Amino acid sequence: MSRELETFEGSHPRSKVIHEQAEEALLYGVPMNWMTRWPGSFPVFFEEAKGNRLTDVDGNRLIDFCLGDTGAMTGHSPEPTVAAASRRLARGITTMLPSEDAVPLGLEMKRRFGLDQWQFSLSASDANRFSIRLCREVTGRDKVLVFNHCYHGSVDETVARLLDGEPAYRIGNIGPPVPIGQTTRVVEFNDFEGLERELAHGDVACVLMEPALTNIGIVLPEPGYLERVRELTREQGTILIIDETHTFCCGPGGYTAAHGLEPDMITIGKPIAGGIPTGAYGMTGEMAGRVLEKTVWEAADVGGVGGTLAGNALSMAAARATLEEVLTDDAFEHMIEMGIRFELGVQSVIDDADLAWTVTRLGCRAEYMLGAERPKSGQAASDAFDVPLDALLHLYMLNRGILMTPFHMMALMCPDTRPEDVDAHTAALAEAAAELTEA
């Protein structure tokens, strides 16, 4: 680690200077605090990103497998999105009036995900927030149910974990507004008995879930689990929301379309507008009817759902171009093919070096984790983390021109990812494995 830190500092002198200057005006020396969670002794400042390549201010060129932690799953600055956004920028960005691009965009969301009615926000966090409020309104129930070590953005009710069988604040939860047990029930992923027990209280408005956990490593559902979740939520009159923000990696209609799920609502954000801030939430016709019945039209602007810039013309134009011309069926086929290549490459290193690690793939997303057994719950995935080794692996890759998602060893493929990019990662991982296993 000492050697890798020395290499890092020697190859990033300008980033160091910029960070020192930034500390005079920016809290933490960055515009958002999680930008400090990268390997190295200071953040790397970037100059340009295009496709799956990123160049930092020191001129270092990186193969990008982070892709903005899914925000740039399209690849950076895809030409159709840039062209559509540029045209829209010159013709008006936001007016509080709907733009025509919203109509084909809504129809495309309906085609892909199978839900009838859609609304747009500025982030997946907002989409989740608004959906939860709507579920509470139409059910008259107070609580939300989420899964241990889940991630649904900055939504108060979801910054939670399971501790000794009870809801608890997630470590680092900043200024929670009320005790988490007042708003949230928490169960382990793949624990059907726990879900059944918690829903039996009859106070859960909605279950908000990723169909596979993705922010604590990838935790896949056990066979039949998602079907039983759907059955039980229907029995209990609980609304099922699928958060596809990360699991969109499974195909053009996300995990929902790829595996035939039947949620009442879907939320998504990040990649659908090629990096321009956008989120969306959709619902079945039945759910839409319940929402319309409860809508107070004269107070629609102050009811806690919406935002002045939500659904703005720039976001709509960018999302329409991204879905119609960038994240196409053919693009996903290529991306998933690269994901398979990545998975096989990592598995070959694990086998050759006899490492007690696993690799898991979800569409065009793949992740390798410490531990000989693939985790089946959020807690098992959390327990498998080795923070110092994780930091070393990220820094090791960065020093060899490969950018991984900073919070865990996750890689995402985009339409610009090529076999030689994947193979470069495999070679770097093999080099690291050889050093780590030296007798």
Image (tube, rainbow, N blue to C red):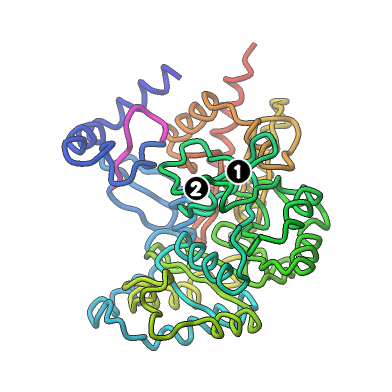
Q: Is residue 238 above or below residue 287?
A: above
> Taking 166 as reference, is 128 left or right?
left
Residue 435 position in % (x across, y down): 57, 20
Q: How many marks?
A: 2
Q: Which residue is mark 1?
A: 149
Q: Are marks 1 and 2 in contact (CB under 8 Å)?
A: no
Range drawn in magenta = 38-46
Callout 2: SS: loop
Q: Residues within 10 Å of mark 1 (few under 14, many from 20)?
A: many
Tell me which corner region of the image, top left, top right, bottom left or bottom right, holds residue 408.
top right
What residue is rendered at 26% in x and 76% in y? 89
Q: Amino acid at mark 2?
A: Phe
Q: Is residue 407 magenta?
A: no
Q: Which residue is mark 2?
A: 65
Q: Is residue 39 magenta?
A: yes
Q: Is residue 293 above or below residue 346?
A: below
Q: Amino acid at mark 1?
A: His
